[in-house]
Image (cartoon, rainbow, N blue to C red):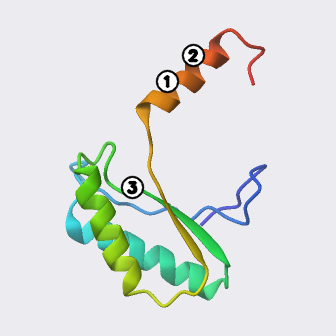
């Protein structure tokens, strides 16, 4: 876990959702969710956002990963807000392209 820097959040919890071969597995995804939620509980956070762990460079099927994350979250005792975040290359490309001609923001 690290500070969130200038972001308007309390912290960033880092997980390793991939193996040494850069591939995700059901176990790595479920363990990542469970371990992150344990930190959330210990730190008494009121909300958490969880990305599609292992769907990017890990090569996992996004819909299957969504199902695994949601299922694992049902096993974690947490009364706060949970958001599962989807990453979109289209939006990322738009942001990068829009910044190319700007003053660096």
What is the C-alpha distance between the residues marked 3 and 2? 24 Å
> Of the numbered discs in the image, which one, if any, rests on residue 52?
3
Whether residues under marks 1 and 2 lie with C-beta atoms below 8 angstroms apart, the answer is yes
**Res 47 → quadrant:** bottom right
Circle nearer the N terminus (3, 2) = 3
Q: Which residue is mark 1?
A: 93
* Camera-side residue of 68 and 21: 68
Pointer 3 local density, CA inside 10 Å: few below 14, some 14–19, many at least 20: many
In the rendered structure, the answer to whether residue 93 lies left or right of residue 4 reads left
Q: Which residue is mark 2?
A: 97
Pointer 2 local density, CA inside 10 Å: few below 14, some 14–19, many at least 20: few
In the rendered image of this protein, does residue 25 appear above or below residue 82?
above
In the rendered image of this protein, does residue 65 appear above or below residue 21?
below
Q: Residue at x 38, y 60 (%)?
A: 16
Q: Residue at x 71, y 61 (%)?
A: 3
Name the secondary structure under disc 3: loop
**Res 79 → quadrant:** bottom right
The N terminus sits in image quarter: bottom right
Q: Residue at x 67, y 85 (%)?
A: 44
Circle nearer the N terminus (1, 3) = 3
> Of the numbered discs in the image, which one, if any, rests on residue 72?
none
Q: Is residue 71 visible?
A: yes
Give residue 37's position: percent from left, percent from top. Answer: 49, 79
Give residue 87's position: percent from left, percent from top. Answer: 45, 44
The C terminus sits in image quarter: top right
Whether residues under marks 1 and 3 lie with C-beta atoms below 8 angstroms apart, the answer is no
In the rendered structure, the answer to whether residue 70 lies left or right of residue 39 reads left
């Amino acid at each position: 876990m690290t500070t969130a820097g200038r972001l308007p959040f309390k912290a960033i919890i880092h997980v390793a959702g991939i193996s040494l071969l850069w591939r995700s597995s059901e176990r790595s995804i479920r363990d990542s969710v469970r371990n992150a939620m344990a930190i959330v509980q210990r730190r008494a956070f009121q909300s958490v956002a969880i990305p599609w762990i292992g769907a990017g460079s890990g090569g996992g099927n996004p819909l299957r990963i969504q199902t695994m994350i949601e299922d694992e979250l049902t096993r974690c005792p947490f009364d706060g807000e949970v958001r599962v975040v989807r990453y979109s290359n289209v939006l990322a490309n738009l942001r990068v392209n829009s910044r190319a001609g700007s003053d660096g923001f």
